[in-house]
Image (tube, rainbow, N blue to C red):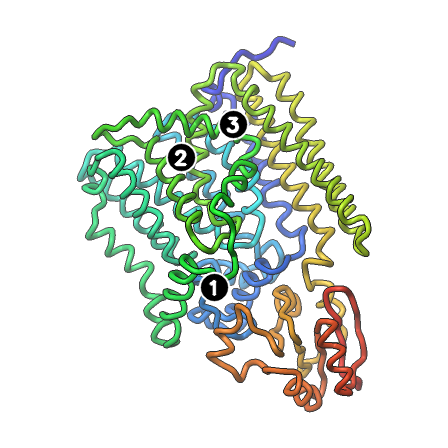
């Protein structure tokens, strides 16, 4: 069979017609089809499912509540969207994860559209393939956290801003695109807070200083843009502050200033923490991304002519730098850098000669497969003496399958070495499916990472007047799977602020728990071993429903 001597510049033509339609169908099935196949995991997925569940149940969409307590760590936009999904389709794992998955796919389409407008049709298509199959991005599109929604809105703001720079200053079209950027930034603020405003401003300031170019500032349409931004972002903050006097101090001081400048949240990591996350998370495109960064930086020599490529470099660097100097770090934080990196990678791919793609994607693809295989083997070895070793072994088998898929795709892509479009599609699909297999394998650890089984064990004993106590612990996944809140006993942490605001909604210690247990007509308690032994020592009447390393569940005898 004669190899197809087409370069990546032919990617749009290669994806037209039935081939493009088939690829889109496969991607959509893989992207959305597995959302409901995994149980919600602790802690984030339980938390971000429970808050919108309570909104839908109570009808209070103004004040976010977690287990009935005021919860002001994040703004409400994703809660609103997920609550609407619950209202329309019911509470399911797939409806809980629907918005991150949708936002992730919309982000891919945004990058495709912007790349097409800025750098050509081939670069847009290549950028979309890179973004949609980069391990880090694909993983977080399937996990219930807030970062994908933030990343989508920031991507819209970034791409709209870049498109404005290509249009005549003062034109009606430029004004519309700039207002879209302002509106998207406002929705980003409603998704995850002031970081959605801080990052664009930081990137613009750094770019202007580096390039000695103030022309983008004259295209901001500052007055109408700021008015639109405030019109979208401000009302909820004003209304929630009026109803909850403690909101402003907690949200703006504790959750922004203190989170960034202090270690109060105990998420301390080294300065370089995000570098390996990005390098590994961009597999199998890491090599091409690094070359794209180099080319983009070189393309933007210091000049007074706006350089979209150099602005992308600055954007990615500002996201990475901003969160690297923060005193609070979590793995998903730098996700907003990835769409910009994908755009630069797409431009680089198009510039490669036919056959050049495989030399840059096959080694990272093989590395990805090898790491998945190694991860499965190491996991099984490290946990072989663990009482739950069978769970880790099964997860390791899934990782091994994912790794073998990635490795098997390498020779397939090699056979397509003179057809960049075919090689790109093969690598992208292999990486996306391998990521999904690894995620599906994580389901084997759910007994250790979720209270779903505990909720199922409790269900037969539940009555309308049953009080479910959570003693000395709070399992984030328990309330959503029970479909009700639990009575907290001696629990603090992230719920401390809500308990301070409404102390009557929690019991401070075991003594008060014992009193409440005695008064309740029907009661169930979920507790740790130490709390269980303390309750037994006090002579509380209890019948064990289930017992595991994570928790003991008891009921009050009839």
> Which tag, 2 or 1, sits closer to the chain's start?
2
According to the picture, the residue beneath numbered tag 2 turns out to be 113
Q: Is residue 209 left or right of residue 481?
A: left
Most foreground residue, 11 or 226: 226
Residue 177, how many percent across, how many down?
29, 42
Determine the image quadrant of residue 360: top right
Most foreground residue, 129 or 94: 129
Residue 34, how many percent across, how many down?
64, 46
Residue 100, placed above or below residue 490: above
According to the picture, the residue beneath numbered tag 3 turns out to be 287
Q: Secondary structure at mark 1?
A: loop
> Which tag, 3 or 1, sits closer to the chain's start?
1
According to the picture, the residue beneath numbered tag 1 turns out to be 264
At 30% from the left and 36% from the top, the residue drawn is 163
At 77% from the left and 84% from the top, the residue drawn is 537
Residue 330, how many percent across, how many down?
52, 52
């Amino acid at each position: 069979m004669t190899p197809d001597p087409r370069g990546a510049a032919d990617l749009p033509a290669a994806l037209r017609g039935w081939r493009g339609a088939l690829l889109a169908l496969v991607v959509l099935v893989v992207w959305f089809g597995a959302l409901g196949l995994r149980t919600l995991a602790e802690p984030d997925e339980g938390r971000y499912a429970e808050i919108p569940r309570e909104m839908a149940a109570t009808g209070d969409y103004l004040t976010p509540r977690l287990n009935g307590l005021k919860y002001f760590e994040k703004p409400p936009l994703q809660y609103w969207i997920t609550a609407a999904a619950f209202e329309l389709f019911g509470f399911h794992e797939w409806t809980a994860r629907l918005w991150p998955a949708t936002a992730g796919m919309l982000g891919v389409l945004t990058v495709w559209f912007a790349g097409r407008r800025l750098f050509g049709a081939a670069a847009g298509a290549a950028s979309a393939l890179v973004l949609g199959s980069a391990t880090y991005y694909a993983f977080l599109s399937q996990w219930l956290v807030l970062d994908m929604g933030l990343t989508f809105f920031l991507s819209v703001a970034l791409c709209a801003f870049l498109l404005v720079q290509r249009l005549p200053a003062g034109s009606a079209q430029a004004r519309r695109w700039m207002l879209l950027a302002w509106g998207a930034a406002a929705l980003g603020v409603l998704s995850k807070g002031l970081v959605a405003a801080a990052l664009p401003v930081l990137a613009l300031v750094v770019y202007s200083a580096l390039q000695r170019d103030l022309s983008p500032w004259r295209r901001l349409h500052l007055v109408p843009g700021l008015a639109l931004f405030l019109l979208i972002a401000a009302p909820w903050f004003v209304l929630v502050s009026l109803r909850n006097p403690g909101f402003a101090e907690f949200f703006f001081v504790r959750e922004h200033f203190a989170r960034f400048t202090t270690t109060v949240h105990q998420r301390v990591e080294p300065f370089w923490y995000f570098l390996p996350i990005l390098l590994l998370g961009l597999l199998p495109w890491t090599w091409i991304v690094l070359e794209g960064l180099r080319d983009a930086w070189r393309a933007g020599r210091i000049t007074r002519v706006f350089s979209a490529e150099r602005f992308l470099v600055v954007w990615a660097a500002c996201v990475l730098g901003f969160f690297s100097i923060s005193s609070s770090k979590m793995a998903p934080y730098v996700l907003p850098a990835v769409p910009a990196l994908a755009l630069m990678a797409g431009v680089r791919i198009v510039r490669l000669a036919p056959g050049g793609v495989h030399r840059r994607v096959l080694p990272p693809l093989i590395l990805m497969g090898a790491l998945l295989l190694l991860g499965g083997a190491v996991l099984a070895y490290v946990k072989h003496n663990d009482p739950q070793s069978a769970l880790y072994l099964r997860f390791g088998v899934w990782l091994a399958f994912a790794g073998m898929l990635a490795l098997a795709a390498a020779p397939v892509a090699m056979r397509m070495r003179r057809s960049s479009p075919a090689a790109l599609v093969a690598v992208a699909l292999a990486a996306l499916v391998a990521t999904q297999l690894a995620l599906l394998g994580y389901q084997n650890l759910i007994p250790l990472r979720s209270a779903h089984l505990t909720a199922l064990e409790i269900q037969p004993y539940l009555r309308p007047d049953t009080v479910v106590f959570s003693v000395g612990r709070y399992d984030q996944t328990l309330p959503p799977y029970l479909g009700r809140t639990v009575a907290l006993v001696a629990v603090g942490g992230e719920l401390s602020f809500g308990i301070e605001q409404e102390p009557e909604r929690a019991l401070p210690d075991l003594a008060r728990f014992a009193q409440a247990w005695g008064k309740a007509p029907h009661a169930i308690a979920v507790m740790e071993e130490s709390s269980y032994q303390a309750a037994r020592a006090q002579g509380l009447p209890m019948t064990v429903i289930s017992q595991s390393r994570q928790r003991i569940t008891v009921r009050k005898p009839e």
